[in-house]
Amino acid sequence: MHAKAEKATSTFPENRLALSIPETATALGVGVWMVKEKLRDGTLKARKIGARTLIDANSVKALWENLPVARFAAPVDRKSAKEPEAA
């Protein structure tokens, strides 16, 4: 049942060869402009069928796998970070 719950929350269609530009943007959680930028710089690979641009699903997965891992600093204790008041 856990696998079913994961699949329900996933926005990436596992059994597809290609995605449209809006589908790619949704799957990555970015805007259409960013997807088009990644197409222009060659990070994402696409093919044309008539007027439609279809993005290779493997290039979307490769982009995701090659993104840097987000690192977050530990929270700062603002009370101890304040300078002592002058007497």
Image (tube, helix red, strand yellow):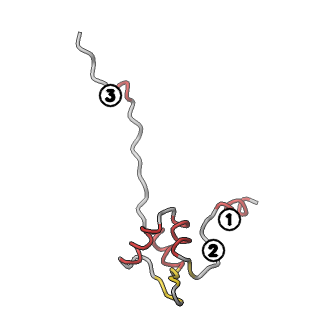
10 Å crowding of disc 1: few (<14), some (14-19), many (20+): few
Residue at image position (56%, 81%) is 18
10 Å crowding of disc 3: few (<14), some (14-19), many (20+): few
Per the image, the residue denoted by label 1 is: 7
Q: Which residue type does callout 2 highlight?
A: Glu
Residue sitting at the far bottom: 50
Residue at image position (51%, 80%) is 55
Residue at image position (41%, 47%) is 72
Residue sitting at the far left: 86
Q: Which residue type does callout 1 highlight?
A: Lys
Q: Is 78 left, or right, of 24 in this rendering?
A: left
Q: Which residue type does callout 3 highlight?
A: Ala
Per the image, the residue denoted by label 2 is: 14
Earlier sequence position, callout 3 versus callout 2: 2
Earlier sequence position, callout 1 versus callout 3: 1
Q: Please report contact status of discs 3 and 2: CB closer than 8 Å, yes or no.
A: no
Residue 76 percent location from the top left of the image: 38, 34
Residue 83 percent location from the top left of the image: 27, 23
Specify the quadrant that holds the C terminus.
top left
Label 2 secondary element = loop
Label 3 secondary element = helix
Pick the residue in front: 24 or 80. 24
Residue sitting at the far top: 87
| Label 3, label 2: how far apart the Cα atoms are | 48 Å
Above or below for 29 versus 56: above
When asked about the image quadrant of residue 4, the answer is bottom right
Above or below for 39 versus 64: below
Earlier sequence position, callout 1 versus callout 2: 1
Per the image, the residue denoted by label 3 is: 81
Q: Please report contact status of discs 1 and 2: CB closer than 8 Å, yes or no.
A: yes
